[in-house]
Amino acid sequence: MSGRGRLALCAFAATVMASGAILPLIETAGWMVQAAFLLAVQSGAGALTRRVPLARPLTVLVQALVGLLLLTVVFAREHALLGVLPGPEAFQHFGTLLSAGGEDVGRYAIPAPATDGIRLMVIGGVMVIGLAVDALAVTFRSAAPAGLPLLALYSVAAGLAGGGASWLWFLLAACGYLVLLLAEGRDRLSQWGRVFGGAVPAQGRSAQGFDSAGGNPLAPVRTGRRIGALALGVALVVPAALPALDGGLLASTGNGTGGGGGGTINAVNPLVSLQDSLRQPDNREVMRYKTNAPDTQDLYLRIVALDQFDGTAWKTSQRDITDIPGRLPQPDGLNPTVNATEIRTNITAAGSYRQNWLPLPYPATDVDIEGRWRFEPVGRTVVGDSGQSTRGAKYFVSSLMVKPTAEQLANAEPPPASLVREYTKVPDVLPDVVEDTARKVTEGAANDYERAVKLQDWFAVDGGFTYDTDVQSGTGVSAISRFLQQKQGFCVHFAFSMAAMARTLGIPARVAVGFTPGSPLADGSMSVGLKEAHAWPELFFEGVGWTRFEPTPSRGTAPEYTRSELPSGGASSPAQPEATATTTPSAAPSASERCPAQARQLGECGAATPPDLTPPGDSGFPLGTTLLVGLAVLLGVGVPLLPMLWRLRVTARRLGSGGRTPADAGARTLAAWLEVTDTAWDFGILPDESQTARKTAARIVRLGALEGEAADGVHRIAGAVEQVLYAPVPKPGTGLSDDVTRIREGLRSGASRGTRLRALLLPRSTVRVVWDLSGRWASLTDVWRGSRWAPERWAGFLRRPSRQRG
């Protein structure tokens, strides 16, 4: 293989290895295979254009055009001319995908799903990095600067992972860069011709290693080692000197500072994943709970409240967070005269359910959970700190079942002016049709409660709306207008629209995201699956606080205080669980311990604590994930040991018995000598194959400080080599294996501990693997060049004759 061919192959491998750092950011790894294939085609285009040859800028331009065509075929085939050539529609589609990808990475927690927008951003980014690396290292013959794009690729991935990128990805990226440096060093050195006194190259080398023709590959090994050590040092020191990257475009949904009392939370919008959950073909269980509540139809598990509407999306405000107090503060606006019964719920999350917000019945009064969890008082939510998630979590919650009467809601006093100002804000760009429709629907209502009920009933019953999860989940002002016109959508559209319309009427409103109560099981517990993911509006009424409404048809249940006729029961109301204590003593104090006097004024504190429950059967590690984790562990453990394993195998093969003919005896002698020189090389004595066997033996004895049987063994094997090479009738050597063992022990005893450890784990002689692979590749390319399809056969048709003018 030519020098540039080796460089191109190494540049491709280095880019793919560095791209591995992105794998933990995305749920599936299929994009990686696709990116590697497209990058290989792009790199192949560069290799062909360099053989023509074209000017260097033209080579880069051709590669960029090929990359654009490939992305067009994969992502914009329907919008391209002939399915390949990108036109205005294709570029417009690219812009749409990139915009959607930007929204997706701002909404999803890690690992994010591989949406079309995210795939375009990731695959396109890898191809751009690959083009930069190939252009610098191969086209412009400067491999050292090519480390900057590779470092940028790894650094971005590590930053997005919140600083939690695995050392394995850094090791792979660093190895790719070092291989690229070594390939360039060898290529540069080969252009100088033969350098005396060094080891011979792989091509043309005999099995015994006595051919003296060729260059010096040891120089690039030493140079690459120094450059690589410097590069790795910079890569390790620079991130430590820079400010910590605490999250990113794909950051988790919550982040707060540690310690008590301080910190803020800045959450992302979880609603895109909500739609994906509703579209899942299987209702995979995410959590299971038991409660002592007499009826679970109103026991919604709330994750987070979205209280800001800027015309583009509903999202959470940036709030102060604190440590979880022993008893959560009194819910805002709740008056002791309203019926509120305290209940106890034991919840166990599945191993596959990863969420930074903790699902809780609202309003929770006490949360008992282990781990790094913080409390946000305004939204009354609990959020994980420093990467804490719900995966496999088991926790206990006390909460209030607030049951106001319609009369209490209708006679509610006006809420505080500050609360009205914050929770009735609507963007100036909100279409007039939203407020006009709200006033038309609520015409004739005497108070805010009646207006809220009319809005709920219009969406759920009277307005002709239908539930459809296939509708695009737009969250901007145009999405609300389109939803009101088309009257098709899922819970997000209903919750967003009712909350926005309530705000136009001066009713404080926000949107809650979480789960409906789930389905009852035979043991009295409740199972909550992905399809129970839900969004609903919460409206504020003074004396009652934030109050749930249910505008989505065929989803959840309308609260009792909004219904004129109350049903006697429902399918969602399981048998009341046993009134027995939980098996965890610390998590199940008596009612008197958990219920202070103020809470008793709100109603009953719960006569019994629900029983403990068995965790959901979902282990959280499906077969595909298990295989990937096993492969990662195997690579992490096996890759560093490959040099040692290869060296042990080579030693066993060289010293093994094989054949009894004189030719076999001579081959064994030469193999034993090669083992001696390689062993000395592993302990720091570089081979000098320009010298005779006798001088080499003296050099090994002198530099290795060998004495006694070890020194005699070196001279005996060297004498046997001279017999094989020069004697008319060679005398076969005897005891070669024993001599090699003595020599190895002698070198080991005279070496330092670091040298011995390196000789075992990272022997220098393993560079012969690279020589062998290079020789094999050269043989394959020689066969290719002799074929009729070789580029040299048709390159002349593309090259202008040197004397042609015009």
Image (spheres, rainbow, N blue to C red):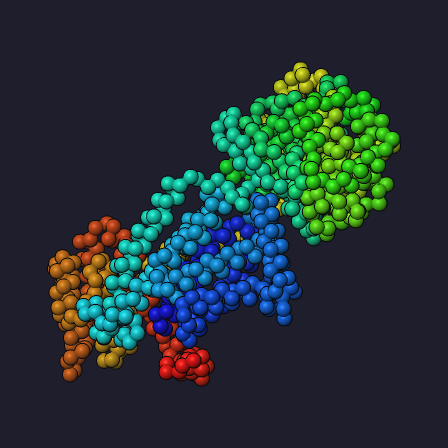
Q: Residue furthest front?
A: 806
Q: Is residue 544 left or right of residue 634?
A: right
Q: Give 57 or 597, whichever is nearer the viewer.
A: 57
Give the residue displayed 45% in from the left and 60% down from the top.
130
In percent of width and height, residue 173 lies at 41, 55
Number of residue marks: 0
| Residue 227, above or below 531 | below
The part of the image, by quadrant, that contains residue 175 is: bottom left
Give the residue displayed 60% in from the left and 47% down from the top.
103
Quadrant (top left, top right, bottom left, bottom right) of the C terminus: bottom left
| Residue 303, above or below 620 | above
Q: Give 529 or 133, whichever is nearer the viewer.
A: 133
In percent of width and height, residue 68 lies at 54, 64
Q: Give 805 or 10, whichever is nearer the viewer.
A: 805
Quadrant (top left, top right, bottom left, bottom right) of the N terminus: bottom left
In percent of width and height, residue 464 lies at 84, 45
Give the residue displayed 83% in from the left and 23% down from the top.
407
